[in-house]
Image (cartoon, rainbow, N blue to C red):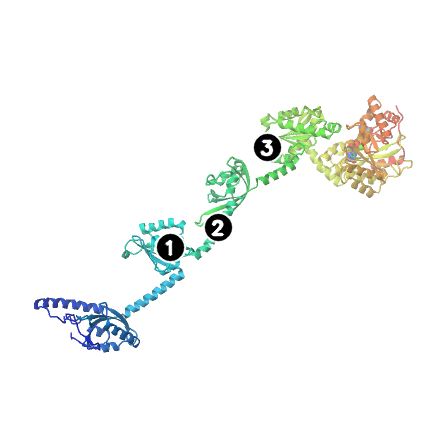
Amino acid sequence: MAEHVVRVGLPGAVMPAGALDVDTGRILAPDLGESSAADVLADVAAERSLLLEAQRIARLGSWTFDMASGLGYLSDGLCRLCGLSPRATLDELLALVHPDDQPAVARFRSRLCRYRSAQPIELEVRDLAGERTYLVRARTECDANGKPSKVHGTVQDFTKFRAMERQLTQDGRLFREAQRVARLGTWEWNTKTGDCLWSSMLYELAGVEPGTKITYADYLELCHPDDRGWVDQRWQELAGTKRPVECEHRVIRPDGTRRVFRIRGEAAGPDSGDAVMIGTAQDVTEQRSTETRMQRSSKRFTDLVAITPVGIALFDDAERLVDANDALCSLLGMDLDQLRGMTAEQLTHPDDRPTSRGGSHSFHSGQRVLATATGKPVYCELNATVSVADDGQRFWLVVFADVTDRRRAAERLRYQATHDELTGLPGRAAVKELLAKLLGGRDYERIALLFCDVDNFKRVNDSLGHDVGDELITALARRLERGLPPSCTVARMSGDEYVVICSDVEEVGGVDALANLAASLLRTAVPVRGQLLRVSACIGAAVPSGQDTSGADLLRFADAAMFAAKARGTGRVSLASDALIASANSQMLLEGQLREAIANDQLILHYQPVVGPDGTVLSAEALVRWPHPERGLLLPGEFLPVAEQGDLLGELDRWVLRAALTEAAEWPQINGSTLGGGVGIAVNLAGLVPGDPEFVEVVCATVAATGIAWDRVVLELVETSLIDLPSRSREAMAELVERGVRFAVDDFGTGYSSLARLKELPAQIIKIDRRFVSGVATDASDFAVARALVDMARAMGRSCVAEGVENATQFHVLRGVGVDAYQGWLLSRPLPAKDFREILKLGPVHIPSGA
Ligand code: C2E
Ligand code: CA
Ligand code: CA
């Protein structure tokens, strides 16, 4: 290879002694010894070829400039690199430099001439087209006096490197941008030294001055104190196991602001050694804040659940309690640990378990009775909703509203509605309910029902007053309750009637034993207000005749049996026999038929004349009859009890009142009648009584509708419906009396009020009962009573009517004591309307002379 020595415009530049020409490999000076020179030359040649090869790969050329001679030398490699022909001069090379870079080149040259340091200086220049970049490196060499004498330099094609660098810069910029956008930083952690390398983004995210030296301890310092412990643990795990770790923790930046970082880390590649971990850190504060909001609301929900007074529990799919709030814990008197794992069934009170209820044990809705730790029942209304947890598991959220108080209040109300106020015993409604329940059950054959009616209770009530009567009723109730076995429920139906419902008659030795036990309990002397009242009761007993026997049936049978017992005397017991049941059933049939008969005007009235001492017909009593399609003409005694049982008396009275007044309004007027304008019409009232709020209204409306004169109307009522009337009823009666209506006390003497009370009875007519009349001629005491009655009635301005006058003797005796009017078979049987009209036409009734 030729040697080029180029003169360049640098004054005094010479090649140094012993310097190596890299292109030729020749040692320029000084000369070495022969033998060693050969060795050296061989070594140098080998080294030179290596250098050449290296230069070629590195796209590197070299040059030298001698200041003393001003000559420059370019290596072949350099010429090739710059596209110059071999032996090109330094000036030719400089001409290739981009004009914009020429000033820098000039500065570089002058710097090199002054430069005394052995350190190379660098300059980067572009080619004319500006497409390629070259790095020029040069070092000044000084002579023995320390004066710069030569410059050695290299030129390296830097184009690719710069492009790469540019790309790298760009990549870096993009990467940083991406990190900024993603709020993502990168890090490297040397687990041996504890040193960390952070990307600038991470510095920014952590709010740490960029470039600050960071150690693992510094990083932990940034962690929220509450997270520090476990975060450290995670990273130590990574360092130990090299398994990737991902976690999220709070960071408190040096300025105090709080962020949430999501950090991933893994072991760096094997090149980095196994102590280096790398990873990313992302600021997820904003994302998490929405989650935090949700968590907060869920926290609020949790708080709400905790403080809500309603019991709330979570159940898993297997209906096991997973979680419960304080309210449920205190409701059930258990703590959460006790409750956890309990099934819905275990929480349910034994009485409300599926077996007893027949339903499922699920807590999905409806009412359930739960049990407290001590087994006390808690009535709850349930509401449940199914939900799915994050892990896909189904669970139930159940709300338990304690309705125990509500239930108690309802029970109290129901108790009041179903229980008798006086005795506190269950009332009629409760009896019906209990019977329905028992008869619907499996053990219906063991049921027995007693109907107990206190003998002559009316007499106690009437003679000693209602308060004494009430005390007696209460005392007897307590005796029954205390004396009967637990399988018996004592109830009060009305007045002096008790009902005993026995759910297991076998337990007391059969229905007869039970009835006798009740009878013996009621046969007693009760101390009331300082006096001993001897009482007894009649008892009717009944048992179901089959599975279709209803509660109402059983009550009817027992009631009928009780009536049968009454018929035999006081303190009697009677069991509803088949015959009795049959008659009770026929009574019920009759009741329906009677209802129909009243509604369809199928009843008729007979009229019995009431005559004066001379036989003049003063009035007629209307007596009801029922021409039954199968049973013939029925008398009141046969169907009035049925009407009473079926609560039809009011209906019946209204019908009779209207029919009687309508008929009477048509009667021909008889001259000589002492009763004002015409023959009077007496109507018996038992259901429509003055106590009835509609009493006056119904009477007035009927009188008005029939057009009869007010003073022809007589209303007959029994003693008991006339005593102790409230003032409102008295006023109602007075109002009718004012218009001309007269009231008659029917059957006087059969009630228990004393004669003295006669004065209090708001009636104008007294009807002396048949019982006194029948003995008036034969029995001295009956005569005395009749005479006293007449005297008293007269003294009080009332008129007297004798009932049931059957013979002339009775008539004459009564006429002797001054009775005002007479009624009885002696004078006339009750007659159909048509026949009575005939009687009216005939004038005064013939009275046989005394025997
Ligand atoms: P009462 O009001 O005492 O009626 C008189 C009863 O005595 C009638 O019986 C009558 O037929 C009967 N009688 C009349 N004269 C004699 C006699 O000389 N000897 C005998 N042994 N009896 C005589 P009746 O019609 O069977 O009525 C019975 C009861 O039925 C009546 O007793 C009355 O309380 C009630 N009653 C009759 N009709 C009606 C009615 O329309 N409405 C209401 N609520 N009750 C009625
Ligand atoms: Ca009567
Ligand atoms: Ca009577």
The residue carrying mark 3 is 444
State left or right for residue 9 relative to residue 302.
Answer: left
x, y percent for residue 241: 31, 50
The residue carrying mark 1 is 263
Q: Nearer the viewer, residue 466 or 580?
A: 466
x, y percent for residue 159: 28, 70
Task: Find out if the beta carbon at label 1 lies less than 8 Å from the nearest ligand 1 atom.
Answer: no
> Earlier along the polypeptide chain: callout 1 or callout 2?
1
- Residue situated furthest left in the rendering: 35
Q: Secondary structure at mark 1?
A: strand
Q: Nearer the viewer, residue 692 or 278?
A: 278
The residue carrying mark 2 is 298
Label 1, label 2: how far apart the Cα atoms are: 25 Å
> Earlier along the polypeptide chain: callout 3 or callout 1?
1
**Amino acid residing under circle 2:** Ser
Q: Marks 3 and 1: CB-CB under 8 Å?
A: no
